[in-house]
Amino acid sequence: MDLSVLLSFAKIIAVIAYLYGLFWIMGLKVRPVTIAGKTLDLSLAINVAGVVVAFGIIQLALTDFGGFRILNEFDTGLLYQACTMTMVALGLNLIYGFNGQFSLGQWGFYGIGAYAAADVTYRWVNGDSSGLIVLGVGTILAGVIILLVGRSLSNLRRMPVLSSFTLYLLGALVSGYVAVLIGRWVSPLLNPLLGTNLEPGPLAQGFWLQIIYFLAVVFAGIFAAEISFLFGLPVLSLGSDYFGIATLGFTIVVYTLMVNSDTFLPFPEMRGGRGMIGIPKLTTWFWAFLFMMAVIVSMRNLIRSSYGRAMISVREDEVAARAMGIDVAGGKLLAFVIGSLFAGLGGGVYAHYIGFLSPGTFDFLIGFNPMIIVVFGGLGSMTGTITASFGWIFFLEGMLRDVLGRISPQAPSWRYVLYPLTLLLLMLIRPEGLMGKIEWGFLKIPVVPLRDTKQEGEVA
Amino acid sequence: MQSISRPQKMPVIVKPNSFLAWIGRGGLILLALLIAYILLRNLIEKPLFFVTNIINGLQLGFVYALIALGYTMVYGIVKLINFAHGDVFMVGAFTSFFAIDRFKLHEWPLRAFPTINPVLGIALGTITTILLSMVVCVLLAVTIERVAYKPLRDAPRIAALITAIGVSFFLEYFGLLDFVFSARFIPYPRPFEVTTWYIADGIHLTQPGEPIPENAIVISNILIIIVILTLGILLFLQYLVRRTKIGIAMRATSFDKPTARLMGINVDSVISFTFAIGAAFAGLGGVLYAIAYPSIKTLMGVYPGLKAFISAVLGGIGSIPGAFVGALIMGQAEALTASYISTPMRDAVAFTILIIVLLVRPTGIFGEPEKEKA
Amino acid sequence: MNTTAETRPVVLQIEGLTKYFGGLRAVYNFDLTLYDGDLVGLIGPNGAGKTTIFNQITGLYLPTSGSIKFNGIELVGFEPHEITRLGIARTFQNIRLFGNLTVLDNLRIALHSQAGYSLFDGILMTRKYRQREAEILERAQELLEIMGLTKVQNELARNLPYGEQRRVEIARALACSPRLLLLDEPAAGMNPKEITQLMDLIHFIRDKFKLTVLLIEHQMRLVMGICEQITVIDFGEIIARGTPKEIQNNPRVIEAYLGKGA
């Protein structure tokens, strides 16, 4: 065995250990201490400090100490890819693992998020603020209209899904049109502050650019979520297998649109099948970590809340869930929209790390990857999904490509033959995934202690 | 505890014929009118070109039908989307490619019996090639079924679905390796010359080098072969399923596996037989597709496979005539979209049609209405 | 029903309920009136349409015609989860617990409609969320204690013995805070001792939670033992109605159960 093989193996172990350490310290509960007569619960402080330290460790590893870095350029790339993959896969696990809807559309929403966010910042650094304004106004307006339409439809029953879909779609189209009008009107006022690509204005550099990046990613995520709402509304009523095929179709349609983004769609800067270049590389470890942790924490809280339990009940038994007062259709839609939001955020982060978007990245064959990751990690296990995402990227894209590349130049393509085989073996041996439903540390669902039994009204 | 939320307003029940219910239908009708307008205008402006498109769509549709039959039968019997079916189709095309290109299998009658009538010789040789492809596909599909799907028969359906995806990926990525099929487009050597006729004031045989008049309907012998073979297979399958013993066993198995087993049906061999027969037609489809569109590649099975599956769902999954009708619709939709709307959107149209049909009629065109649930 | 004037309020009033599946008539012209605190049985041979009636009351099926009024509210057209929120809870003939979840979670899911905090409260873990969650937990544990299930609260529901699964299902239905409880063959698969316990339990929860109970049952001992009124249906139509004693001696009932000539 080569030394560098051992080294890359050690890196995988280190990354996984890092994640487990992070979740451990985030879930750490300490006994309250009494200082100067006051009882303080330090758990939260320790958890937050742990996150900050964890952030710092990687930040240090990424810092250049006179030509030496613990994590080189290649590893950094893997790290960012793993973060985005975690977001996408967690979103899919919410849809599929927790809510039981077999979706192959996650990759499409990822692509939508990537292209939308990239377009905003690309235009921004090239002196055009219309991207941000149209996307921002459009998503907010569409969100408001969707909520309003939803409210006005709420006392209708047995409404054909096609009709409500048509109403929502009209609302979304109107808000998109209004957003374009507003963009046309407002952006010339802002554009002088942006300068040009070579001479950035005050709003197109430094702090302000970071803000724009943040807004672009968030709006792109919301945009993906709204598309998923419009798509999911009719399609979620189809039933599991058909839903899977329809979402696969969604990914294919998104891919087709990307390939024709400069001809069929009016976005010449996306350059269709040739790929979009010149996206500012704004993703730093700070942002990648921030977005990933936001996704992990909010998903964990969601799963623990009553809404999360309602989603899980839909997976377990739809009829029983309805009989227990759970709005099954609403729960499915909610999980689908939130899952797509995560994918959209992941896409935004990815686009600004890689700086180049090609439709080939969003091909539906690659779109099976998140599904496979979720299955590997275990349906309904967040820990498993996160581990599998990091393991997948570092092992398959990192180590295996490296190791096989040494054997012969053609060998790296063998890794795509290996992983379906692994998947088949896994399905035969351990169909519930590597982790099953086991959670770790902060993600662990606490066991509720037995109640102090008061001896009253006991029966049987 | 907060008290239970009680609806403040009485809900309004939307009657099937009320205005609100017509909003969605109205949208669909507008869409249909728009499509009808586009098609009619083109039909009136260039009727011959329109007919040519219809014929192209037919050719595509009949090939899809061959693949869709396998999908619909397998889904009907084990409720599994056999993602690998499109790759079996690809293997069929490649088998015939190697047989023709490397071993000149299609010329064996000419070599063995030099005095044979050349047309008969080529026909025999082609049939041999097709049979070889079908046999290879059957072996492949039965192996897949035995190795990958059978152990999971009692597992959750989703495990089988993931396995199907895994098998499909294995075949694709293995085929993509340079020493197997590689990722390139490979020109396909046809076993026989494709002869075309054009119809413009009378039927003419197209001579090599002769330009086809602009306003002419072109028909090729491969189209005729595809149509005749597919129709024959359709009739054969209907006969098989309705009249023969194995057909009854298949229907029984698809209806209720445990009971079928109790009735003395060997469920495993019935399922294998279903996979085999589907794969045989996929192999045939692969060869015909390659002859009709003579350029093959490893991922050639992905889109036809998906569209064939959509055809099967469209027609009502499990129904053999349904798969056929669905495939014809899919072929027309694809050909007409490519010509009159936008070439890249032809894949999108397939899925849009699927979603709309399922929303209006959840069990597909020929599907039986849903039964009472427990 | 009783000819004497009833002073208790009407909880459930079903009139002319009819359901066709395609050409098959599952329920025809079914009437039923339940007064507050009633404990009424619905019996009939297999396939007589009992569960279909339950499914229509709870909104899983839309009736072909007829009306179902609950506390004066017309239920036809409401979604199943809304009907549950209005105060009708049910159990299932073939137990439908959320098998991969703990007993406690099964109950907490039933309490979802009473959670009273928004999605954002949940994601941000606000004070309201913590408060409500504590209340939900308290309520769920209280119910488990009443049903004698405290010890198994962290077990997966599918790992419980059959009798306990039945109790969990009743507890879960009670967690919906119903006024009307529909029990679909609660005694199926139970031995005589368990049935006796179940009879006590049904009486107990009816009094404790001030419920009205409608139950479907095959076990004659249970029905005859606890129901005040019994309605018998066959082929979707009412063939008899009365007190247990009247039903036992009704020739049409005997015929329906044992066949002609018995």
Image (tube, helix red, strand yellow):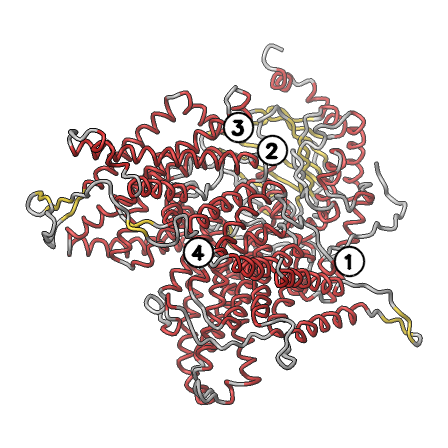
Could you tell me which residue is drawn at 60 percent across and 15 percent down? C259
Label at residue C51 = 2
Q: Chain of mark 3?
A: B
* Vertical placement of residue A20 versus A216, above or below: above
Q: Chain of mark 4?
A: A
Residue type highlighted by circle 2: Thr
CB under 8 Å between discs 3 and 4: no
Foreground residue, A47 or C55? A47
Residue type highlighted by circle 4: Phe
Residue type highlighted by circle 3: Lys
The residue under label 1 is C134
Distance (Cα) linking label 1 and label 3: 48 Å
Same chain for labels 1 and 2? Say yes or no. Answer: yes
Residue A275, by quadrant, is bottom left
Question: Please, what secondary structure does the residue beneath circle 4 have?
Answer: helix
* Residue A231 drawn at (x, y percent): 46, 57
Foreground residue, A64 or B54? A64
- Viewer-nearest of discs 1 and 2: 1
The residue under label 4 is A250
The residue under label 3 is B257
Could you tell me which residue is drawn at 75 percent across and 56 percent down? B1
* Residue A299 drawn at (x, y percent): 64, 61
Could you tell me which residue is drawn at 49 percent across and 55 percent down? A411
Q: Does A367 sit left or right of C150 as displayed?
A: left
Residue C3 appearing in the image: no
Distance (Cα) linking label 4 and label 1: 42 Å
